[in-house]
Image (cartoon, rainbow, N blue to C red):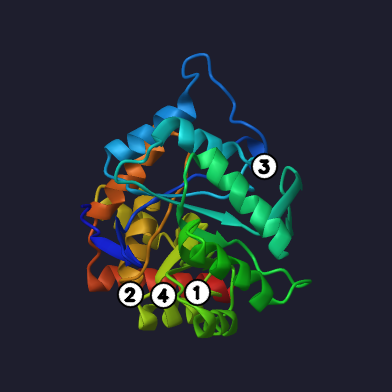
Amino acid sequence: MSDAGTITLGDLEVDRLGFGAMRITGPGVWGPPARSPDAPDGAIALLRRAVELGVNFIDTADSYGPNVSEELIAAALAPYDGVVVATKAGLTRSGPGRWSPDGRPEYLRAALDGSLRRLRLEQIDLYQFHRPDPAVPFAESLGFFIEARAAGKIRHIGLSNVTVAQLEQALEMTEIVSVQNRYSALDRDSQLVLDACTQRRIAFIPWFPLAAGEAAAATGVLEQIAAAHAATSSQIALAWLLAASPVMLPIPGTSQLAHLEENVAAAQIVLDPGELEALNSAGSAARRDR
């Protein structure tokens, strides 16, 4: 267990600092990663090192690559001894940086079967609806996830990029164990969603978590606190997230071993109340200036 403690996803317990596997793909989250002559198996080595460091929650999506991230995770970690793998469906790709929602049950069904095959699994631990599709009723899309869980293909259901109203609608239909929204000290547009998750003890997985560095850098607060802890600004940004709520489950991603080890070490940093208040104030000022 890391110094950040653990959190439960239904009946699964994981450490509160996971690994996001989006960046192990190519530029624009498209295609395979660049292969270095010095490290031809860089992504596979990175994933294995994450587990060696104690990370036991890996988050990915079929749209990362597409398919590439899931394939690399399987190559590196299958059969996943003690590791919880979460993936997502609901976004399609047409090129680097291009994302389009697709919440049709027939599409989601094919996506799930593809993820099971690529990940070499009979059941996915946590399957997340990547983004609601404005062209498809939310309940219709979620209905597929409920059916897939009843069929034994997924263990738990998570949501991503949702509002409080959508979370509440989903909870009226079924158990939801996690929500993954964009969140950092700079971007707290999902604060109400985080508050709802905290109240209900639902894991909140922030994506783009290190934007917190942008929030406080302009005032120097982040650098000052980092210096006091002999840490980096990114480590302090992660420590701030872990302190923000007991249901927070950050998944910082990277393609570099040094950054991976730096991120994992952030779980050991404890910020005092004054430092947390300074970061909160700096983040609020940055949001007003956006």
Query: What amino acid is at disc 2?
Result: Glu
Quote the CA–CA distance across marks 2 and 4.
Answer: 6 Å
Quote the CA–CA distance across marks 3 and 4.
Answer: 33 Å
Residue 53: image x %, image y %? 27, 40
In front of the other: 41 or 97: 41
Residue occupied by mark 4: 281
22 relative position to 199: left or right? right
Residue 218 in view: no
Disc marking residue 177: none
Quote the CA–CA distance across marks 1 and 2.
Answer: 12 Å
Quote the CA–CA distance across marks 3 and 2.
Answer: 35 Å
In front of the other: 290 or 154: 154
Residue occupied by mark 2: 277
Q: Are marks 2 and 4 in contact (CB under 8 Å)?
A: yes
Residue 129 in view: yes
Q: Are marks 1 and 2 in contact (CB under 8 Å)?
A: no
Q: Secondary structure at mark 1?
A: helix
Residue occupied by mark 1: 285
Query: What amino acid is at disc 4?
Result: Ser
User: Dot 3 surroundings within 10 Å: few (below 14), some, or many (20 or more)?
Assistant: some
Of marks 3 and 4, the one in the foreground = 3
Residue 195: image x %, image y %? 43, 81
Q: Residue at x 47, y 22 (%)?
A: 41
**Which of marks 4 and 3 precedes in the sequence?**
3
